[in-house]
């Protein structure tokens, strides 16, 4: 290295060419962070946790943060604003302060896997930059504040595994950026409102939602891939338009009170991505919906524990022998007749996993795992078929 270069390097470390302006966190952001920590029970804040390192004798966003504010927040590049609040899952217990709404540059708020309780503050609706809101696995109760549907930047919303009650906000569809919504494992009631138009994943499992799946609620939805509505109280028919939502891949409607599947023969399944359908544990009557076998990617189908009658269609066997269908659960219905023999022949159609047990089938060989659980007693089947076991 030349002496000149060395000299320049030495000089530059004394010259104020990059003045170290010590930017400080906006007072209202500090105020909000203080309020957050103050609302959490001190005995749930261990010294080695993120919140344990928050010492307000120091500026939260100023760098370096080696001893204080070592985790839990991220700040803007100029160290003036808090942009993300992600607490560690160590069991923080307390209510959530409405003053968090002052963190107006926040894009991410993640308090999942803690013990927060009480209401979700409706003031969070002022976080207009918020993209991710995760309050998963806490004990939040009360309604979902309708004002949250003003969060126009929100992409991902996860408030699963809490104790939320009441209905979904009627204005839910105004969450125009939302792609992932998980409100599973709460105590939500009422019917589905119109859904956000850009949803990719919808999970509302294990609530007490009711009403039917009407097409108008899914209007304009074209990117929906995953629908998990299992373990609710939905009723009525599941109609063809639902299975034909473009891009739909996985459907869980199990453990509801659906009574019909209406899926006529339809030409436009060719581009369908539908892979898995679970309609088990409902109250669906009629013959098996043979047209579900016409979906080209269909790999897993559960229609178990319903009130289906009639034979197992040959089309289901065909789908299994084509190596498309890998799982087929039809147990717990009133199916009768002889299942297609190919299911038991040792060929490609017999590698499907599943069950045909607890039906009214004739010649379901116990040597096949599909038939390993037994059929219903003849008396039950006679009664179901009005005296005869034939349709
Ligand atoms: C915060 O830091 C100051 C200065 O080092 C110290 O005196 C004080 O005890 C700290 N407070 C907490 C709560 O750790
Ligand atoms: C449905 O209910 C059954 C029996 O209560 C349970 O074993 C199963 O896990 C439930 N399935 C879903 C998808 O909720």
Image (cartoon, rainbow, N blue to C red):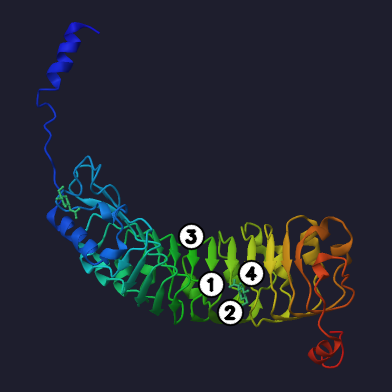
Q: Quadrant of residue 308?
A: bottom right
In the image, what residue occupies the spot 17% across and 8% down? 4
Earlier-in-chain disc, 3 versus 4: 3
Q: Which mark is residue 278?
A: 4
> Which sits earlier in the primary sequence, circle 4 or circle 1?
1
Q: Kindly report which numbered mark, 1 or 3, lies closer to the viewer in this rendering.
A: 1
Mark 1–mark 2 CB contact (< 8 Å): yes
**Which of the marked residues, 1 or 3, is nearer the chain's N terminus?**
3
| Foreground: disc 3 or disc 4 | 4
Give the label on residue 229, or none.
1
Which residue is found at the position 53% from the left and 72% from the top?
229
Look at the picture and state if 179 lies above or below 21. below
Disc assigned to residue 240: none
Please report contact status of discs 4 and 1: CB closer than 8 Å, yes or no.
no
Mark 4 and mark 2 lie on one chain; the one further toward the N terminus is 2
Instruction: Give the number of the mark in front: 2 or 3.
Output: 2
- Write down the residue under mark 2: 256
């Amino acid at each position: 290295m030349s002496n000149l270069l060395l000299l320049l390097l030495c000089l530059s470390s004394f010259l104020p060419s990059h003045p170290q302006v010590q930017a400080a966190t906006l007072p209202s952001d500090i105020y909000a962070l203080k309020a957050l920590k103050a609302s959490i029970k001190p005995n749930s804040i261990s010294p080695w946790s993120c919140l344990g390192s928050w010492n307000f004798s120091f500026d939260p966003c100023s760098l370096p943060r080696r001893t204080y504010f070592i985790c839990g927040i991220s700040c803007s590049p100029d160290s003036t604003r808090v942009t993300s609040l992600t607490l560690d899952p160590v069991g923080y217990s307390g209510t959530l302060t409405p003053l968090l709404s002052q963190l107006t540059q926040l894009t991410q708020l993640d308090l999942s896997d803690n013990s927060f309780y009480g209401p979700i503050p409706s003031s969070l609706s002022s976080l207009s930059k918020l993209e991710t809101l995760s309050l998963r696995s806490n004990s939040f109760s009360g309604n979902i504040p309708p004002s949250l549907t003003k969060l126009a930047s929100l992409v991902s919303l996860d408030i699963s595994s809490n104790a939320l009650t009441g209905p979904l906000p009627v204005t839910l569809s105004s969450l125009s950026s939302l792609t992932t919504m998980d409100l599973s494992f709460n105590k939500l009631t009422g019917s589905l409102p119109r859904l956000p138009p850009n949803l990719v994943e919808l999970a509302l499992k294990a609530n007490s939602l009711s009403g039917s799946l009407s097409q108008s609620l899914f209007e304009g939805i074209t990117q929906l891939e995953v629908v998990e509505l299992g373990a609710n109280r939905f009723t009525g028919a599941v109609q063809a338009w639902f299975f034909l939502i473009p891009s739909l891949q996985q459907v869980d409607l199990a453990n509801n009170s659906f009574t019909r599947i209406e899926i006529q023969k339809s030409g436009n399944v060719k581009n369908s991505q539908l892979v898995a359908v679970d309609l088990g544990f409902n109250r669906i009557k009629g013959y098996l919906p043979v047209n579900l076998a016409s979906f080209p990617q269909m790999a897993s189908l559960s229609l178990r524990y319903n009130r289906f009658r009639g034979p197992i269609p040959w089309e289901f066997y065909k789908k299994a022998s084509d190596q498309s269908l890998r799982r087929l659960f039809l147990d717990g219905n009133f199916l009768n007749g002889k299942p297609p023999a190919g299911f038991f022949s040792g060929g490609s159609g017999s590698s499907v996993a599943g069950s045909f047990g607890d039906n009214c089938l004739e010649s379901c060989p116990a040597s096949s795992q599909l038939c390993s659980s037994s059929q219903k007693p003849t008396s039950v089947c006679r009664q179901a078929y009005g005296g005869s076991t034939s349709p």
